[in-house]
Image (spheres, grey):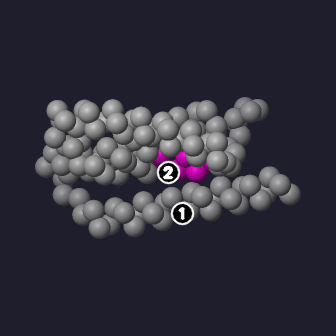
Amino acid sequence: MAKGTEPCCSSPATLGYWFVVSLLAWALLNLIGIYWAPLRAPWTACLFAMAIGCAANWSKNHSLHCIITGPLFFVAGVGFVLSGAGLIRLNAYWVWPILAAGVGIAFLLEWQQAKRSQS
C-alpha cells in the first residue's frame, strides 16, 4: 500500500463518520424502497446502508474492519434483494450468524493490528 493508506483502527470519530454516512444512505434507500419492492424490507436497506458506510469509511479513514465488513454487508443485501424478488430462496436464520461472525472477526483482526502497531 502507498504511504498514508495503511489500514488503521477505529476511533469514536471513524465510527461516528460511518454512522452518519450509513444513516443518510439508509434514508435514501428507504425512499427508493417506496417504489422498488425488493428494497422495502428494512434489513435490506440497512445492510446496503452499512456497506455504503463501510466504503465511505474505508476511503476516508482506512478502517481495517471496513474492508472486510463492507463486502459482507453488500453480499447479504444482494442476497435479500434477490430473495425479495423471488429469484432465490434465502434462509435469514443463516445470514445473521454469518454476518455477526464476520463482523466479530473483522474487529478482532483490527484490534490485533492495533496491538502490533503499538509494539
Tell me if residue 81 is in the magenta stretch.
no
Name the side, left or right, on which 56 lies relative to 51: right
Task: In the rendered structure, find residue 69 and report the number of the disc placed on it.
Answer: 2
Task: In the rendered structure, find residue 45 and report the number of the disc placed on it.
Answer: none
Q: N-terminal of the two: label 1 or label 2?
A: 2
**Residue 16: x %, y % from top left:** 57, 43
**Residue 18: x %, y % from top left:** 53, 41
Q: Is residue 67 visible?
A: no
Q: Residue at x 45, y 63 (%)?
A: 100
Please give the residue where the numbered disc 1 appears in the rendered image: 104
Q: In which quarter of the image is the N terminus?
A: top right
Q: Is residue 91 visible?
A: yes
Q: Which residue is drawn at 50% across and 51% down?
A: 69
Image quadrant where residue 6 sits: top right
Name the side, left or right, on which 30 lies relative to 20: left
Q: Residue at x 13, y 49 (%)?
A: 86
Looking at the rendered structure, the kind of residue marked 1 is: Gly
**Residue 107: x %, y % from top left:** 60, 58
Assign the magenta stretch its main secondary structure. helix
Secondary structure, mark 2, is helix
Q: Residue at x 72, y 55 (%)?
A: 113
**Residue range highlighted in magenta:** 64-71
Q: Quadrant of the C terminus?
A: bottom right
Name the side, left or right, on which 111 lies relative to 20: right
Secondary structure, mark 1, is helix
Q: Which of 28 and 47 is in front in this view?
A: 28
Looking at the rendered structure, the kind of residue marked 2 is: Thr
User: Considering only vertical position in the picture, is 56 above or below 63?
Assistant: above
**Residue 96: x %, y % from top left:** 36, 63
